[in-house]
Amino acid sequence: MKYQIERLVQAALACLPPDIVPADVHPTVEVERTRDAAHGDFATNIALQLAKPARKNPRQLAQAIVDCIPASELVTKIEIAGPGFINFHFSPQAYQQELSRIFDLGVAYGYNKRGAGQSVVVEFVSANPTGPLHVGHGRQAALGDALAALLQSQGYPVSREFYYNDAGVQIQNLALSVQARARGYKPGDPEWQEGWYAGEYIQDIANDFLARKTVHAFDGEPIRASGKIDDLDAIRRFAVTCLRHEQDMDLQKFGVRFDTYYLESSLYSDGKVDTTVQSLIASGHTYEKDNALWLKTTDFGDDKDRVMRKSDGTYTYFVPDVAYHVTKWQRGFCRAINVQGTDHHGTIARVRAGLQALNIGIPKGYPDYVLHKMVKVMRGGEEVKISKRAGSYVTVRDLIDWVGRDAVRFFLVSRKADSEFVFDIDLALAEGEENPVYYVQYAHARVCSVFRQLQEKGLTHERDIGETNVDLLTEPHEKALIRRLTYYPELLENATHDLEPHQLAHYLRELAGDFHTYYNAHKFIIDDVKLRNARLNLVAATRQVLENGLKLLGVSAPEKMESKKAATAGEQ
RNA sequence: GCCCCCGUAGCUCAGUGGAUAGAGCGACCGCCUCCUAAGCGGUAGGUCGCAGGUUCAACUCCUGCCGGGGGCACCA
């Protein structure tokens, strides 16, 4: 709808008398949704933009533009308001056209093919297999999955990828921790070293290892524990597999699926790390100093150069990171988006610098980062510290068990990624309106209920009758709801462009609010056949958009609300 | 010390350079003979951290301060 208005304005500008606007002025036509319904549906500030270069009064200029706007059946009224805005009011035909689109497109309403042919890889969670997923990973999972879904809605072929840091110091510590537990040591014992993992799950893994149990991650061979307590390699393989399996279970419960899993260790075994190092040396952006190999990241905007190969011969972490991102590019992803915690901020400049140094055609801003802030977990008015090493932290599994998957997913995407998130366990545990997800789901269930009632009364929903009588929808509540519904495709476009799923969560909250207000103010199942079907069309379209939006966030759209209280009462 | 993010109602947060800065929660007052009250309506609550600058127009962009968080290792 927006583009149709833009075309009208552009056509008007094109046929303005040449003496009005200097020929060298080429303004970008910006058409925006109005904030206030009294201002119509769309507005443009073009006259305000042009007033100065044209040396004209903005309102007079606006009038000149309006005079040139071609007639359109979509627009009933065009008016000049305020300092020189041009406001467009849509006709019932325009509304009807868009409502029909919602019915015709169904679950695909809001989708477009803008991103066709531009493959995107979204990397998220990427937790080290050293413990269960914590709430920070939950935020990443909710964010990353929603982002991927948004990109898909805009036509981008998307791959969801999980990168396993299964090489390095942490994994060694994991193996040592399990070995120590298997030998009967505990955190706090003199033998227990700093940096080892203290969580109880380490004891569980140690027990399973000694019991020679078999585990397998979804993508690997089953591994049977040898039970040999001195075989650190065997312990490491077993422990990593155990934890990968556990993380898989958590993600499955969270409703998040990945298309690809990439193992850091494979970068070494495939020789990709070495190849990358050789290419970087060949590029001339490296030098030896203090017995170490350095990369001149300052050539690419970093504030100081970075060590690639330490004096002990091992690589620093960012070398495999660069090698990994080279594979993303080589695998055909013209865009890469990494969802990570803000603690990864320092790595951005280095990875990008490394990719630029290779000079193999990777764009400058590759990859994109969506960094999220910490999730602070509150319980009983006190903060629960999140720390893998301390072993005491709230896991994704805990949250799902306490408040349900839908609430956790909706909660975690409902805020901007770069704002700190306070997850109050007590609040989330409380039943009722505190969880906005209920509010949105209830709106969906209410529409479903209306149609159940309709059926019980022996009536049917006649879409055609509703469509021919769309002009009967004249109530302010109806107009507001229609405005909101028809904004959905633009909302998805904006949320995707900005990589901000929270825009969708907010939109759904507002759409549900418009519906609940309407529901309370008017009845839908009425005797007047024409008005009844017009209203049923409107609420059916509302249900469709609610379903579509919730789906993108990974939240269910129930046809009935199951009372938690009743369920609890039933258990007692 | 340097870099990034944040600062908007009592609390949690929205707010693509535009028109009278908005929700939810909490508080207070109302609404079930009526398609689910998990809902709706209303009232109260603001020097948009401070000070400059750019602009026809600044919560929004720029600079500097103040306050909060995170990052700055031959750690990953």
Image: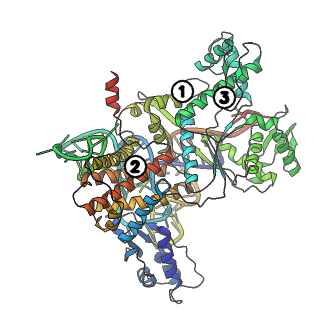
Q: Earlier in the sequence, mark 1 or mark 2?
A: 1
- Which residue lies at the image location 64% right of the left edge and 13% below the top edge? A207
Q: Is residue A543 above or below residue A429?
A: below
Badge 1 and badge 2 both on one subunit: yes
Residue A288 rendering spot, x and y as whole percentages: 88, 42
Give the structural element (helix, strand or loop) at label 3.
loop
User: Whole-Å distance between the Cαs marked 3 and 2?
Assistant: 38 Å
Q: Nearer the viewer, mark 3 or mark 2?
A: 3
On the rendered structure, is A524 left or right of A29? Answer: left
Q: Is residue A22 above or below residue A335?
A: below
- The residue carrying mark 2 is A509
Structural crowding at the residue carrying mark 1, measured as other residues with C-alpha within 10 Å and reported as few (<14), some (14–19) or many (≥20):
some
Residue A360 visible to an observer of this rendering: yes
- The residue carrying mark 1 is A393
Q: Earlier in the sequence, mark 1 or mark 3?
A: 3
Badge 3 and badge 2 both on one subunit: yes
Under mark 1, the amino acid is Tyr
Q: Is residue A305 above or below residue A169?
A: below
How many numbered circles are shown?
3
Under mark 2, the amino acid is Arg
User: Whole-Å distance between the Cαs marked 1 and 2?
Assistant: 30 Å
Residue A291 rendering spot, x and y as whole percentages: 88, 36
